[in-house]
Image (cartoon, rainbow, N blue to C red):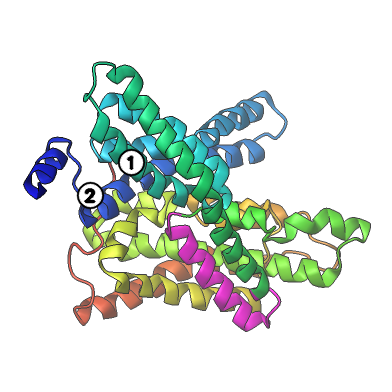
Amino acid sequence: MRNTKKTFLERKNVIISFRRYGIDAMSAMALGLFASLLIGTIINTIGQNVAPGSMISQRLLEIGGYATSVTGPVMALAIGHALMAPPLVLYSLAAVGAACNALGGSGGPLAVFFIGIIACEVGKLVSKETKIDIIVTPAVTIITGGALAIVFAPMFKSVCDALGVFIGWATNLQPLLMGIVVSAVVGAVLTLPISSAAICAAIGLGGGAVLSGLADGTVTMEIWNGLSLAGGAATAGCCAHMLGYAVLSFPDNGIGGFVAQGLGTSMLQVPNLMKKPVLWIPPTITAAVTGALSTCVFRMRNNGPAISSGMGTSGLVGPIGIITGWSQLPKGYEAGAFQWAGMILICFVLPIVITWATGKVFRAKGIIKPGDLKIDMG
């Protein structure tokens, strides 16, 4: 019986292994996320800041909206492709991804990952087993994924919302500890298969989220001050992870990998981090340092859209959010040369320098070895 079951799974190409799910599927999903939500957000940012109000700006925003709207389906299709799903299973996963992302909220990507894998493998099991395969296979795949999404996707949302509450709690701490905690946590979330941008938007992490309330008196200066500084710390952490992994993995990935992670997404490193968790340490150290400097020394604020607090250097959305937010600062909070210097140091220079130096130590001690940070860039 065991051999028969094993033979059946092999015939269906259902291989239950860490590599198949934790590396192949995760890597593909990261590429799918970049090809939808992240690139869409980048296009939107360009549209918002290049000739605002013009026809070109409006068209860019329209195109970016189309890209972000298919985030769930694209991630699910990427997972199915990595798992070598038959055509009917692969195409059916689009509906599963849409359901997971819609019901999962800020935890949508995480829901797509787990539920997409299950729906894909179940669909593969029934694929071409009946004479009405064209009906059975997509029906089983979509019903399985849809039912799981209805039950479990809101749970992923609750987990990520709880994480958002934790980040919000950290904003009420003293600036030093707040900067370290928010920067390290949001930076780590950026690298995980969770939407850090969605979490930041959901909890309004950034001064821009409450500027209107500050103007009409419904929000106090203390609330705005804490959220704007927390938004700056979140931006610092995201930049630390993105540029950190870009420079840390340069010996393995070269300039292509540097650009893919530094301007794209550090989520490409998740499969490597699952195999070797110690790789989290260098960028996290960097995030803690830049987060503390952001809040305590440079008082860096993010008054741009809340989503920009969770984007880092992905399309330069984070730094652009800081710069555009300067025009909205309340009286007494003018931005000058010191703020420009702080933004450049926190968002660009220090993430590269600190992580490079930490990486040199780790490589010298043999903690990081050649190939540990090699990524799949499709």
In magenta stretch: residue 178: yes
Residue placed furthest toward the front = 1
Give 133 or 374, whichever is nearer the viewer.
133
Q: How crowded is mark 1: few (under 14 residues within 10 Å), some or many (20 or more)?
A: many
| Label 1 secondary element | helix
Q: What residue is rendered at 42% in x and 31% in y?
A: 142
Where is residue 216 shown, x and y percent of the image?
Answer: 92, 56
In the picture, measured across the screen, residue 18 lies left or right of residue 74, that is: left
Q: Which of marks 2 and 1 is nearer the N terminus?
A: 2
For this rendering, which residue is in front, 227 or 327? 227
The magenta-colored residue range is: 170-193
Residue denoted by label 1: 79
In reply to whether residue 331 is colored magenta, the answer given is no
Instruction: Say which quarter of the image contains residue 211.
Output: bottom right
Residue appearing at x 84%, y 53% in the figure: 212
User: At x 86% / y 57%, what residue is drawn?
Assistant: 213
Q: Distance between the residues labelled 2 and 1?
A: 10 Å
Q: Where is residue 2 in the image (x, y as percent from the top left)?
A: 10, 49
Task: Work out whether 290 lies above or below 250.
Answer: below
Mark 2: few, some, or many residues within 10 Å (few <14, many ≥20)? some
Res 336 quadrant in image: bottom right
